[in-house]
Image (cartoon, coloured by chain):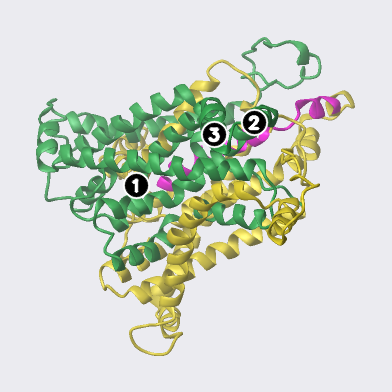
Chain colours: A green, B yellow
Amino acid sequence: MSTVTGIRRGDAIAAGDPRPRRRLVARPAAWLVWGVVVFFFLNLLGVVGSVLVSSFGQRWFDTWLPDGYTGKWYGEAWHEFALFDVIVVTLQVSLLVVALSLVVGVPAAYVLARRNFPGKRLALLVFLLPILMPPITYGIPLATVLYKFGLAGHLSGVVLANLVPSVPFVILTMTPFIEQIDPRIENAARMCGAGLWSVFLRVLSPLLLPGMLASAILVLVRTVGMFELTFLTAGPDSQTLVVALYYSMSAAGIRAQQSVDAMAVIYTSMMLVLLVISLRYVNPTQLVARVKEEPDS
Amino acid sequence: MSATATRPAPSAGAPQSPRAHWRHRLAERGVDAQLWLLAPAVLFVVLLFLYPFFYGLGLSFQPTEGGPFSDYARFFGDAYQRDTMWITLRLALPAALLNVLASVPIAYRMRGRFRGKRLVTILLVVPITLGTVLTAQGLLNFLGPTGWFNRVLLALHLTDEPVRLVHNYWGVFFSLVITGFPFAFLLVLSYLTGIDPTLERAAATLGAGWWQRFRMITLPLLAPGLATTFCLTFVLAFSVFPSAVLVGNPAGETRVISIAAYQAAYEQYDYPYASAIAMIMGLIELVVISVVLLARTRLYTGSTGGKG
């Protein structure tokens, strides 16, 4: 129940008041905290803004702003980096990953949410590990195995590699949604003669639709933004947008800085569109992590 | 975990064959046909996570030349490679610590309801979704010698010449803060809002000042959450790869361990060596995480009373 100004004295009294009155007098600590936040956002704005301004700039060397503005870098980036193909690949990979991880993850989440069985803690741990480990650590052995079976370097390898963190993520985000559903609904359906399959399709699926939508969008955002795993397994014709951006950046100097910036802006706007869509369905904190605390015994 | 679905016991009166008997015994312990739903996910984890992991582990003991441990010996014997561990820890530990410690006071201020809170959280999600590659590109423009940041410093006469902030340690550090801080902040905020506010109000009626309330009530309840947040932020920072290459100095100051592993695999095509480095990387990380989580078991664990 704290106000913006950070005055906490009236907490006990203001408890019942839903909207405490703001006061503009603040303690130095509050100013410090807000100063840090504003400083962070200013820098963030500078980071994103300088890419945006540079992508529209004609020439930009030692001045505050570019000499003139032009949109030609976008056309150049579009052709030079074959962005159409890259975006098609990105969409293919992400949609495949979303569909497959839902198909594999939702039934598992159901069992983990509803049932107790020997070895459940072990199963939970194994499902948590791919999220807790950094992608590079398991990505290199995984890429080695995928190369051994001739899967890496193609779309299938990229999809398989991206599934590794996505399936556990679906399981973790779906479990609370499933726990919310009253088990008596299922029991009633079963008593009326519905089998497991029809309980799933006709009772659970409609109830779980919001949850599935949320976790699908979260997986989509994470897959489009996933760099390491795609980088390790992608071949020349299966690069996603982030990986193509990385390659164009690390080969800096060959191409104009601005066309790389233009590509970065295209990537940013794609992510922002996804973000705006996803914020309609999910809580912002869910985009970060939904790590369910294991029950402490 | 609510496992309340009680299943009706199989018909008891019928004469039982040995198989039905076993099925009954297993069902009592919670094993029945429904567990098959778990099968695809288990198969998937085994094939795509556990098998590659153990394959890599086995591979790391089969170097192209020398005995089973010679790749590990090679890594620890070569100062250029060995130092990557310290470089990574020197980047990841301070960055993770700063991110977690800075988020505590800010989240403490913001845990209540105020106008624009949703906007702030949305803005904070932006750098996380943008990812490290784009952040690196932005930092190169923004912090570079002719970038806006140095321009402001020069205009305010804080420095006489541009400060060098990219292509060294600080560039990577800033990129870790920009992507890691919002992550840590949102996690800490969700842990804080999970603490029942009436506890603090009760303390206030007993005459505790804000520092006492924070120190004696909020902090002990928050500490386990902070440990978890630290682990997750550390994992993110420890595997820093794109920004270490792009805004760092990948040949020297910021040659982190993931660069060493990548070079072994994709530049020298020495997969056993690369697997060995990846295993060392995983091990260091597990050590740090288990130290933190061990310390966490000494803290209060249990309900924090709120919605979380």
User: Which residue is depicted at the point 14% across and 38% down?
Assistant: A77
Q: Residue at x 43, y 44 (%)?
A: A101
The span from disc 1 to disc 2 (Cα, nearest Å) is 65 Å
Dot label at residue A200: 3
**Which numbered disc, 1 or 2, marks the residue closer to the eye?**
2
Q: Nearer the viewer, residue A88 or A75?
A: A88
Distance from label 3 to label 1 (Cα)? 61 Å
Q: Is residue A133 above or below residue A107?
A: below
User: Is label 1 on the same chain as label 2?
Assistant: no
Q: Mark 2 highlights which residue?
A: A186
Using the numbered discs, state the Cα–Cα distance from disc 2 to disc 3 in whole angstroms: 9 Å
Name the amino acid type tagged 2. Glu
Residue A59 position, x and y percent, is: 12, 34
Q: Nearer the viewer, residue B233 or B66?
A: B66
Q: Earlier in the sequence, mark 2 or mark 3?
A: 2
Residue B18 lies left or right of residue A124; in this view the side is right
Please name the amino acid that badge 3 sits on: Phe
Q: Nearer the viewer, residue B84 or A99?
A: A99
| Marked residue chain, label 1 | B
Tell me the crowding category of disc 1: few under 14, some 14 to 19, or many 20 or more residues within 10 angstroms, Cα based.
some
SS at circle 2? helix
- Where disc 3 sits, the SS reads helix
Label 3 crowding class (10 Å Cα cut-off): few <14, some 14-19, many 20+?
some
Whether tag 1 and tag 2 are in contact, CB under 8 A, the answer is no
* Secondary structure mainly formed by the magenta segment: helix
Q: Which residues are magenta?
A: B174-202
**Residue that badge 1 annotates:** B163
Q: Quadrant of the N terminus of chain A?
A: top right
Residue B58 x/y as whole percent: 45, 76
